[in-house]
Amino acid sequence: MTVAAGLFGAALSLIYLWMAAGPPDRLRSAAKTGSVLALALAAALGGAPGVAVAGLGAAAMGDLALSRPGERAFGIGVFWFSLAQILFVAGFGVDVSVALGVDTGRPWPLLILLALGGIVALGLGSGGILTRGLVGLYAPLLLGMGWMALASGVVWWMLGAALFILSDALIALSLFDRVPARVKRGLAYAVWATYWPAVACLTAGFLQV
C-alpha cells in the first residue's frame, strides 16, 4: 500500500506538471494537492514519524493555497509551508547543538544556502505587508531545514532539502517583474519538476529511518 500510494502521487504529479503553467482551476488544484497528500499517506502507511506525516500534510495544504489566485491565498500558502519546515526539522530529529557544529570542510554549502535564501526572500517578499512578514519568517525556516538536513547525514533528506530550496528560488525568480512571460512559463514547469521530487525525497528519508 505504501508503494501504491507513492505511485499514485507520482501519477498525479505528472498530471499537474502538464498543467503547471495553466490558469487556476479545480482539477489543477486537486492534482497538485493530491500528489503530496498521497506522499503523506505513503509515509503514514510506511510507519514514518507522525510529525513527518503532519509536515507532508502541511505542505499539501500549502500547495492547495498556492494553486489558487490572489495575495491572500499566497500568504496562506507561505504560512502552511512555514509550518511544514518546522515539522520536517522535528522529523529529522537532529540535535541543534550537533547541527551548529557541522563542519562540511568547504564553505560552498553555506554560501549556496545563503544565496538561494536571498533570492527567495527578495522574490517572495514582493507582496503586501502580511506577505512580506510571512516570508521574513519562512526564508530562515527554509534555510534552517536545509542546514538540519545537511547535519543529519541522510542522503534522501539532503537531496530533498536541496531540491526544495532550489524550487522556492525558482518560484521567487518567476515573481520578479522583469522576467519575460515566456521565461515565467518555463519556470512554472521547472518549479514543479524540482518541488515534487523534493517532497518525495524527504518522504523516502522518513521511511528509511
Image (cartoon, rainbow, N blue to C red):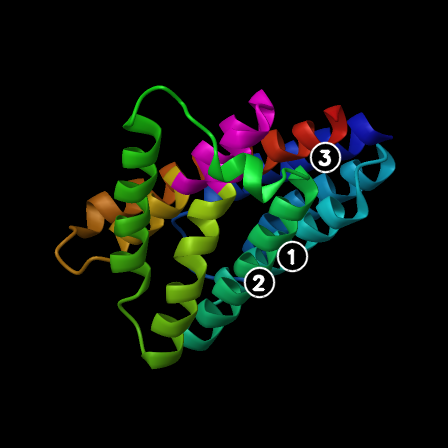
Residue most extreme to the left:
178
With respect to residue 91, does 61 lie above or below? below
Q: Which residues are magenta?
A: 146-165
Residue 165 visible, this angle: yes
Residue 33: percent from left, percent from top: 62, 52
The N terminus appears in which quarter of the rendering? top right
Residue highlighted by disc 3: 8
Given residues 63 and 119, the one toward you in this image is 119
> Badge 1, how many Cα within 10 Å: few under 14, some, many 20+?
many
* Residue located 27% across and 58% down the image: 123
Amino acid, disc 3: Phe
* Residue located 53% across and 43% down the image: 16
Callout 3: SS? helix
Question: Quick check: marks 2 and 1 in contact, CB under 8 Å?
Answer: yes
Residue 69 visible, this angle: no
Residue 9: percent from left, percent from top: 68, 37
Q: Is residue 116 magenta?
A: no
Majority secondary structure of the magenta segment? helix
Residues under labels 2 and 1: Cα distance? 5 Å
Residues under labels 2 and 3: Cα distance? 23 Å
Callout 1: SS? helix
Residue highlighted by disc 2: 80
Amino acid, disc 2: Trp
Residue highlighted by disc 1: 58
> Badge 2, how many Cα within 10 Å: few under 14, some, many 20+?
many
